[in-house]
Every structure is written in C-alpha cells, then in structure tokens.
Image: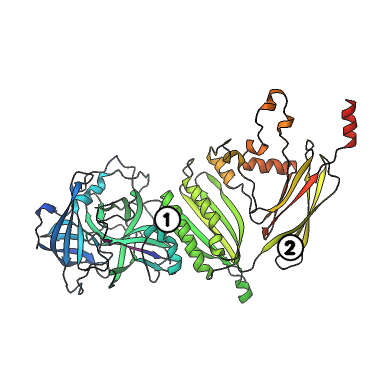
C-alpha cells in the first residue's frame, strides 16, 4: 500500500534477559475462515476484530466500516489496491475504544467473513480510526518464492514500533534504533531460553517476530490475521522490515496491558515461545509456517571489569551474555554490532576514557580450529565505542565474504576493560654505529608506561646484503601507519579464496605491538639491466600479500614485532647510513 502518513501498528521490543528447500512459488494460501471481497463492503457495515488485549486469549472488539479507499494501480497479482477505513467502538474489553500498536494484523470480520487485517493508524489523530489491509492483498505475500533452507523440524528447545526494552537500558537499546527507527519504552526482562511450542496460531493471537533471542531478545509484536490448513499463517497487515524472502523465528507474545498515549496507544508485550518461521516480509504483511524453525547465528559476550579488584580485593569471573540472531548475513551484522555495543555500555556502567583488551573468536563450518583475533584499545573519551570498532568490521566481513558458507557460525567476544590508561609511549630510539650490509643492527628503544619510569628494549635487525646508501629505520605502534596491503590495494593481487581471506584479515598489526622495521627497496629500477630497465619495477610488497610480506621480513630480519601488555603510542624514525665493506670494494676492483 502507498499510504505514507499512517503509523504502522506493530511493536518492536528488546529484552535482555524446517523450512525445506522451497519450490519456485508456494501453493495459493487459502484462509481457514471464509472471506469477503472489498467490493462487497458498504459504509456503515458493522463487524468486529480479534486481538489480545491482556494475557494470551483473543477477544472481539466492535468496529464499523467508514469508507473504502481505492488507489490507482494494481498489486503484484493484479488486484486493485484498496484500504478499508474503520472506526472502533468502546466495549468492556476496550473501554477507551482506541486502536493500539500491537494490533497490526488483527483480523477484521463482517458477518463472520474475513475482510483483512488492521494495519495502520495515525499519530496524534483519532485513535479510534484505522486502515485495514484487504485479505486478498495479504494472500499475495505467498506469490513470492521463499528463501531456500535445508532445515528440518526442530526436536529440541531452542537456546536460545515503540521499542520495548528490558535489561538493556534505553540508551543501550538506541544502538539498534537504525533497524526500527522508532521510540523506546522500558520494561522488565524475560531473559534466557524461550520454549519451543508445537501448537498452532489462531487468528487474533499475539505474535512476536524475532531478530534476536536468548539473553537478548529483539522482536516485533503484532497479531495473526489468518491461518491455513497446510500450516501457514499471515500477520501484521503491513511490512516488518520489508526484506522480502526472510527466515525470522516467530512465536507467541504475552500482552501485559494496553498503555494509553497521546501519540499512539500501544500493547506492552513480551515473548512467550517460539512456534515457527516467517518466510515473507512484504508490503501487505508477513507470512510464514508453523512448526518449522530457522537456524541461527549464536553469539556470546564475556565481559570483565578489571577495576573491580580495586574495590573488592578480587577479580570477579567474566559476566556472560548469550544470544542468537537471524541468519540473514547483512541484517545479522547490524544486529550483532548493535547488541554487543548495547550490552557493553550497560555492563561497563560508565562512559569515557579507558583501556580494553578485546578477543574475538569465530567458529563455524570450515574453521576446524576456530579463528581468533586479539587487540588492545585506548580512548581518552569513549572506550566503550572504540573497543568494538574492529570486531564489528571483522564480523561484517566474515558474514558477507563471498567464498564459503561457514554456517552454522558462532561469535564469542571477550572484553576486559579498565579506566586506567595502559599506554606505552615510544620516547627515544638509538642505533649502533658502523652499519654495513649483511650486519646485525642493534636498536635500543626507550619506552615509558603512563606516568612511570622508562624502560629500554633491545632489538636486532639484519641489514640485507644488497642494501646500499641510506635506509629508514621506523619504530612505531602497530596502530600507527600499519603495513598496508599494497598488492591488493594497488590491484596487483586479489583476495581469491576463503583461506586467503582468513590469513589476510588476521595479518594486520595490533595496537599493543611495538614494530621495529627497516624500509629498504631492494628491487629498484637502477638494478635492472637492458630492456628491463625501461619497465616499471614493483616493490616486493606489491608482489606479496600482507601476510607473506610480514612472514618474509621477519624471517630475513628487517622486521621485529614485540607484543606488549600496553597500547603502544607514537612513532620515531632514524636514517641509517650504510658504510661500504673495504674488503668487498678491493675484491670488486680486482675483478
């Protein structure tokens, strides 16, 4: 439908606390209740809608047809696009007579015949008035192909818009606001596992469509419109995220009460179970199957506050939060980043400066030993944000990489944080004299921990035998001017497989690494002879992947990496003048 001014009546909430491979198109959806065409409706017709006002049992609320609104054009299946304007009346079950968010999808009946689903209303308008999405338009949701999944019926419990927030604070829940674009309402937490239910929906049931579940739950609450004998259902009467073919778990929701609001009344609801899978998310509503269950991406956050020991005298075990998200690779990236970020804000309990040690472990198909990346971060203003920046980028890259299906996949993020600035400043660098090609070069680095006495570290580099003239010595933090992927960035090579993807994504320098390196271009145009002298010469780094460059340079001795318990800060350079070996000069003259 093309109406833009109305407010969609689903409710998205956050709580801390198998579809076989489809044919090209599903069979025609046939509601179990008889239907009435929009063309048969008349102004003044009276009927009712079914919805849950409190608890889990649907009740009848009286309505009256005000008008049928026709739009130009036709929908995908060739039906004329219409909306039915209704007015709700007061009743013992709904004393205000108001429509509320969470009623979206409520089936509307005239003379015991289904005409469609309540889909929308207006902010700051007459809250008795709403628009109904005709049932024939909702049925067309199943004219699209489902997203193929080779998943069987579940035999075990799954571990497991205002925006309802429980357990996550309101500010933390804002991390997911980009998915919903809605306001937030705080509520208590359910948390933990949700039971797997093998019963069926009936029209009027409160339904939750999940994006995340477990210790963190994120879902939209609406109402079931219709069911069919083959186990499918229709709900909402408007899109959830309008992502087309999807695989979102669905379940029952428990309605605590309807909260009146000047903006728009809403149902306060929490999830109660998982019952099936939404397979279509289209403009006229959502559709799916009961008794079939989607796989998921599992996630864990293990958080440790290192400052606790200064208050209690001992360091407590990490706090664990476990949750799952929908297997949509692109949506899951946003979900994981938002949930991890929100959890960290709450568990850290503060904002501002600090140091974090972050370890990201990824397990999945094709990762026999898992994959791990560890790094340290310091921020003088918002460590709770900076700590997750790299991990979020890596998670996104893993989920979107084009080489291999690694599902089922799991992410474990371990974060330990302190307010203390654990910084190691590069204060001075000195080198041994009389540097000759082929010799070892002694490098002394003076390092100062934050407001503590300086310490010295000695490193030995090997000067290549074919080096000549001047070369550059760089002592730096892994976070300062890290080695680039020259071959990939310059277009000389590409990431061409999953194993290469793994090696290169983990090859980057870490912030707690002290890097000591000699920069020498041993492949130069002046060394070329004949016709080759006219050809452009590539640096060694332009012929290699970054992982290969680092391995080669460490082996030849022009690169040394020291991993510390601090975030290394700074960079210093020195110019090394190479002196010629007298004996070698005499030998070359004799020749």
Measure how far apart labels 1 and 2 are at the Cα level: 44 Å
**Toward which corner of the image does residue 376 lie, by quadrant?**
bottom right
**Closer to the camera in the image, 155 or 519:** 519
- Residue 205: x and y, percent? 25, 62
**Magenta span of residues:** 4-12
Residue assigned mark 2: 448
Q: Quadrant of the C terminus?
A: top right
Looking at the image, is mark 1 or mark 2 nearer the viewer?
2
Badge 2: how crowded within 10 Å, few (<14), some, or many (20+)? some
Q: Is residue 131 left or right of residue 456?
A: left
* Number of callouts: 2
The residue at 23%/47% (across/down) is 140
> Can residue 36 be seen at all in this image of the molecule?
no
Residue assigned mark 1: 325
The residue at 71%/60% (across/down) is 425
Q: Is residue 578 left or right of residue 89?
A: right
- Residue 506: x and y, percent? 59, 48
| Image: 253 above or below 554 | below
**Closer to the camera in the image, 79 or 577:** 577
**Toward which corner of the image does residue 554 lie, by quadrant?**
top right
Q: Residue 367 bears which disc, if any?
A: none
Q: Is residue 383 left or right of residue 574?
A: left
């Amino acid at each position: 439908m093309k109406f833009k001014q109305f407010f969609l009546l689903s409710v998205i909430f956050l709580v801390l606390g198998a579809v076989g491979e489809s044919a090209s198109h599903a069979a025609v959806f046939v509601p179990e209740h008889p239907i009435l065409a929009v063309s048969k409706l008349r102004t003044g017709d009276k009927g009712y809608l079914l919805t849950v006002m409190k608890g889990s049992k649907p009740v009848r609320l009286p309505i009256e047809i005000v008008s049928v609104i026709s739009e130009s054009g036709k929908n995908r299946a060739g039906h004329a696009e219409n909306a039915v304007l209704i007015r709700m009346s007061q009743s013992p079950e709904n004393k205000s007579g108001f429509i509320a968010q969470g009623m979206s999808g409520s089936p509307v009946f005239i003379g015991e015949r289904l005409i469609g689903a309540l889909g929308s209303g207006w902010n700051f308008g007459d809250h008795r008035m709403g628009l109904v999405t005709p049932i024939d338009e909702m049925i067309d949701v199943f004219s699209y192909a489902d997203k193929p999944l080779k998943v069987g019926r579940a035999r075990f419990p799954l571990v497991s818009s205002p925006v309802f927030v429980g357990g996550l604070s309101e500010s933390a829940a804002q991390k997911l606001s980009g998915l919903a674009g809605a306001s937030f309402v705080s509520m208590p937490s359910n948390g933990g596992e949700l039971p797997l239910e093998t019963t069926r929906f009936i029209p009027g049931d409160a339904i939750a469509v999940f994006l995340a579940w477990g210790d963190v739950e994120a879902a939209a609450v609406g109402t079931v419109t219709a069911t069919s004998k083959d186990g499918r259902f229709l709900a909402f009467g408007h899109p959830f995220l309008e992502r087309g073919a999807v695989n979102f778990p669905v379940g029952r929701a428990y309605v605590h009460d309807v909260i009146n609001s000047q903006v728009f009344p809403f149902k306060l609801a929490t999830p109660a179970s998982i019952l099936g899978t939404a397979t279509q998310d289209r403009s006229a509503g959502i559709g799916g199957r009961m008794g079939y269950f989607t796989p998921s991406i599992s996630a864990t956050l293990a958080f440790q506050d290192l400052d606790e020991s200064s208050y209690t005298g001992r360091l407590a075990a990490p706090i664990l939060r476990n949750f799952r998200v929908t297997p949509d690779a692109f949506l899951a990236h946003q979900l994981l980043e938002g949930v991890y970020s929100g959890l960290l804000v709450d568990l850290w309990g503060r904002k501002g400066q600090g140091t974090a040690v972050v370890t990201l472990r990824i397990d999945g198909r094709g990762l026999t030993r898992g994959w791990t990346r560890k790094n340290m971060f310091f921020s003088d203003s918002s460590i709770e944000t900076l700590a997750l920046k790299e991990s979020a980028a890596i998670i996104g890259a893993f989920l979107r990489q084009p080489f291999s299906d690694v599902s089922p996949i799991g992410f474990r993020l371990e974060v330990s944080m302190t307010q203390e600035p654990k910084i190691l400043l590069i204060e001075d660098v000195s080198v041994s004299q009389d540097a000759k090609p082929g010799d070892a070069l002694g490098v002394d680095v003076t390092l100062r921990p934050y407001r503590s006495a300086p310490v010295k570290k000695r490193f030995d580099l090997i000067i290549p035998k074919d080096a000549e003239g001047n070369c550059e010595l760089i002592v730096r933090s892994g976070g300062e001017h890290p080695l680039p992927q020259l071959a990939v960035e310059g277009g000389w090579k590409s990431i061409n497989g999953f194993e290469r993807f793994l090696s290169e994504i983990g090859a980057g320098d870490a912030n707690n690494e002290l890097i000591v390196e000699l920069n020498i271009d041993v492949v130069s145009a002046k060394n070329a002879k004949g016709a080759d002298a006219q050809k452009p010469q590539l640096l060694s780094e332009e012929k290699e992947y970054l992982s290969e460059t680092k391995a080669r340079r460490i082996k030849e001795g022009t690169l040394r990496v020291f991993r510390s318990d601090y975030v290394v800060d700074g960079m210093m350079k020195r110019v090394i003048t190479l002196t010629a070996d007298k004996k070698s000069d005499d030998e070359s003259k004799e020749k």
